[in-house]
Structures are given as C-alpha cells and as structure tokens.
Image: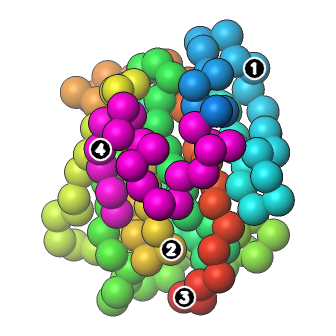
Amino acid sequence: MIFDNLENLENYDIVTPEIIEFVNGLSVNTPCGRYELSDKVYANVDDYQTRSELDCSLEAHRKFIDIQFLIYGAERIDFINIDGLKVLESYDCVKDILFFKKPKCELNRIYLNGKNFAIFYPDDAHAPQITTLNLQNNVKKVVIKIAVEWQI
C-alpha cells in the first residue's frame, strides 16, 4: 500500500502518461462512469455518501492494482495485508473482488481528502467509503484500475 500527495503521483513507476493526462483533466464536473485509458488501464468515477465502518467490508482484487483518490469530500479507508484473513465472500472473477471478514486486531487507517491518493496492491485488503468523524460525506471518487498478473 502506498499513501502520498497527488502532486507526487507521477513519481511512481506504475503511473503511465495516460493516467497523468486523465488525472490532470478531472474536475468536479467530470461525469461519473468508466473511462478507458489504455488496454490495461481504466478509471471509474463515482459519487456517493460515505458509510458507517460497520457497513464497509474488506475487499481485495487479483487482476488490478487500485489507485484511489477523491475529487471532493473526505473518507476513511481501513487496510491490512491479506495474510491470515478469513474469506467472507468467495472471489468473483467477473467483478475481480474478494471479501474478507474483519479481523479482531485494529486495522491501519488512512484519510483521503482530495489532495492525496492511495495505491492498493492485490495483497492489500481495504475497506473504503468509511465516514470521517462519524459524519457522512458526499464524495466524488476516482479509482484507477491497472491490470496485473497476480494470484491470491
């Protein structure tokens, strides 16, 4: 997992020129939907209200690395390495998602705020969309999906 300021996004090897061009073109008026950036990279832009920690599940992906950031709003993301986690819902190969039971230990936390980003690799279980300060927020979020060859 990587957490950094958006101004440093282009410093990471997995970030292609197509990704930088797409990110630089985003605004609050960017329509929600799926954007094809290349044959191995696409982005989803979505808006929603953050939810209670109890309503957010740990998830991981096998085929894609996620780069997540907000255009506006604030949300918390909890995360932990998948090692030792118990599966809650089996892997869905169409949606490329696997859900895990939350462990009894405390999870790591980050807060997205529109000025930073997180990169989640296939071995990073993450629970996005969590409220901050116990207050629901309206957010507009971008998730860039980068194809990888990796197996859990």
Q: Earlier in the sequence, mark 1 or mark 2?
A: 1
* Magenta residue span: 1-20
Q: Which mark is residue 122?
A: 2
Q: Where is residue 5 shown, x and y percent of the image?
A: 31, 36
Q: Label 1, label 2: how many angstroms apart (C-alpha)?
A: 28 Å
Q: Where is residue 87 shown, x and y percent of the image?
A: 50, 82
Q: Is residue 15 magenta?
A: yes
State which mark lies toward you, 2 or 4: 4
* Amino acid type shown at disc 2: Pro
* Amino acid type shown at disc 3: Ile
* Residue named by callout 3: 152
Residue 135 vs 63, above or below: the answer is above
Q: Which mark is residue 31?
A: 1
The residue nearer to you, when weighing 88 against 67, is 67
* Residue named by callout 4: 4
Q: Secondary structure at mark 1?
A: loop
Q: Secondary structure at mark 4?
A: strand
Q: Earlier in the sequence, mark 1 or mark 4?
A: 4
Q: Quadrant of residue 33?
A: top right
The residue nearer to you, when weighing 77 against 16, is 16
Q: Is residue 5 left or right of residue 63?
A: left
CB under 8 Å between discs 2 and 3: yes
Q: Label 4, label 3: how many angstroms apart (C-alpha)?
A: 26 Å
Residue 146 vs 98, above or below: the answer is above
Q: Is residue 113 left or right of residue 70?
A: left
User: Which residue: 62% across, 44% down?
Assistant: 17
